[in-house]
Amino acid sequence: MHIEQSAIAQWLSHAAAAARAASDELAHMPVAQRNEGLHEAAAELRAQSDVIVAANAVDIEAFDAAGGTAAFRDRLLLTPARVEAMAVGLEEIAELPDPLERTLSEWTRPNGLVIRRVAQPLGVIGMIYESRPNVGADAAGICLKSGNAVILRGGSDSIFSARAIHAAFTEGLRRAGIPETMVQIPPATDRAFVAAMLAASGMIDLIIPRGGRTLVERVQAEARVPVLAHAEGLCHTYIHTAADPEMARQVLTNGKMRRTGVCGATETLLIDSDIAPGLLPLLINDLAKLGCEFRADVGARAIVSSLPAAKDADFDTEWLAPMLSVAVVDDVDAALDHIARHGSSHTEAIVTEDAEIAARFLNRSTSAVTMWNASTQFCDGGEFGFGAEIGIATGRVHARGPVGVEQLTTYRYQVIGTGQVRP
């Protein structure tokens, strides 16, 4: 449905003003009330689970008719278990310490002035996301806890799911006495709402895109509002010469195949040449049994000749599917060099029993998250103890890695004097 540009501008102006007022109220609201809102929203998600799943079925039916990919269908799908996970995530956010009642630093100057750096909300967040409807609940919960308001613009493929989740969440807010305008969604799926949000300087304080490369690149190119974004999840698992073979098999299998459509899934295997002849065939066999396909460099194909040859572009591809790029490297420095040339600064993992090599990898990797002897799929706000996440930030400004409640705060200064004047 097409909506006139003037109507979109009017809606956004009113929505942003209401969001600003809600954020100002949340910034000074007792944490107990914010937590009550999270618990009430979780309870309403559970109560409306059947309604939410039914709404999602409408989205799934339209998606199937359009012939979407299996990976994106998995992202879109809601089940009772996934609705329950949304509710649990909100309850976990409620149990986190208050991110607002924090003095980040305090010091006294020689003239007696006491200077404090204290936390405060960012203000009004604009969230633009694709496919995964649970993002709406996660984002609303994180924003509520951190004292921010949020305008959510989900993809057209998840509109019925998004509306059902929004209705449940705002009912929880109402019961807790919290302004329902702290979380709002546009009234239609017209893409012009995205353009309006990107141009809303002064109304929206931060834009967070969560979706594919095309979406993120558009947001970064067009936004007149600061952007907290993540690039593709082109994650690597590097198996070092001193890796425990059984651990390597388990970590790689989980990192690649647990859920292939998430941004923390391993997309490239790097393995040291010293152990590749013995271990690589086992790794390939493990994954092939689960339906994984491969694209391999010359070194890997010299060991497992049945592997399809990789093109240069394959090592720059986020598969989001049961497909794995494979390369044989000489050592940890070669692995780090490969990651620097092909990675997206998201998540990397090393499997090794050599603590010195692990430290080298951990310290020299510049990605947002680097892991030692653990699956890349642990790059997740819930797994980090954040309750949920609003996204994974891979840029170098403000926040990196899973973005939770603390990452959606900034700070200001309080200066306490006893009558000092400046000479």
Image: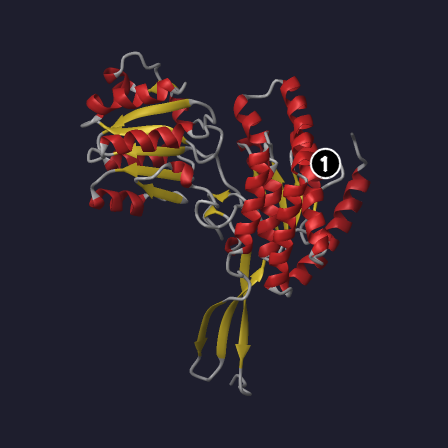
Q: How many marks?
A: 1
What kind of colouring is applied to the model shown? Answer: secondary structure
Which is nearer the eye, 127 or 97? 97
Percent x, y of residue 301: 28, 16
Q: Is residue 51 above or below residue 44?
A: above
**With respect to residue 66, does 23 lie above or below?**
below
Check the image and name the residue furthest to the bottom: 419
On screen, residue 370 above or below 145: above
> Quick one: SS at disc 1?
helix
Give me the residue at 64% from left, 55% from top: 37
Q: Is residue 102 left or right of residue 288?
A: right
Tell me what residue is drawn at x 20 percent, y 27 percent.
Answer: 275
Label 1: how many Cα within 10 Å (few below 14, some 14–19, many 20+): some
Disc 1 marks a residue whose amino acid type is Ala
On-image quarter of the N terminus:
top right
State the residue position of label 1.
192
User: Residue most toward the front?
Assistant: 47
The answer to whether one can see residue 294 in this image is no
